Image (tube, grey):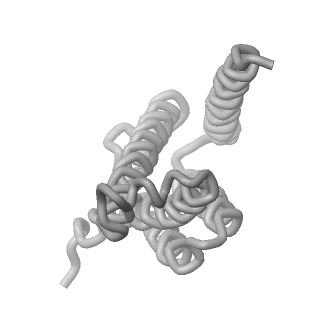
Amino acid sequence: MSNRYITSHFPLISILLFSLAFAIYVQGFILGELANLGIYSGMLEFISESGIKLTLMFLLLLFFFMVFSALKLIADTTIELSMLFFSKDEEGNELNKVRAGSWIYLAASVIAVLLAQFIFMVVILFLLASISYFVFLVYKISNTLSLSGLIGFIFFQVIFWSVFVLAVVFALLRLYNSFMASLPI
């Protein structure tokens, strides 16, 4: 039995598992900080401990799910846009071959959940899965690209993601600096 849609749910499961891994770590961090600040004991007067943990886990899971879903949407759009610019494949047959690469993210997300207490390892796993998927993508579509098309495809992806990451870091630094400047000394 062969069905091309059998792996169609892997991206959703991967996003959920990576979101869970990040949410577990951030929940522990937030609860620790609330306890250090003395706020957690006051919260326990109004909500049970399990209620606080479940609510926080739900909100963090939802937040990270939205972030990873947006990143997947952006990644799919940039891949298809670069295929439009540089590929000779007009029917999208090569994109169907690439969908098998969702196994990479699925395996990495399962490992990430197991290592959820170590945020550095989870980030490294996500970055390794992304780089591995990119290499898999380039390998699978290389037969429909000329040499200049392959170079253009790779540069398009690298430049887009570099600019995207730098823009996010720049925006976060500006926000941080404005927040720090507004604090009374």
Which residue is rendered at x = 42% and y = 67% of the image? 17
Q: Give 119 or 31, whichever is nearer the viewer.
A: 31
In the image, what residue occupies the spot 49% across and 66% down? 24
Quarter in which the N terminus is drawn: bottom left
The answer to whether one can see residue 174 in this image is yes
| Observer able to see residue 101 | no
Residue beneath the point at 44% across and 59% down? 19
Rendered location of residue 65, percent (x, y) = 38, 51
Q: Which residue is farthest right?
A: 185
| 41, 119: nearer the viewer | 41
Q: Is residue 86 above or below residue 99?
A: above
User: x, y percentage for residue 178?
Assistant: 70, 16
Which image quadrant: the C terminus? top right
Q: Where does residue 67 sit, x and y in percent of width and height?
A: 44, 43
| Occupied quadrant, residue 129 | bottom right
Residue furthest bottom in the image? 1
Give the residue at x 45% y 36%.
Answer: 74
What is the x, y in percent for residue 115?
59, 77
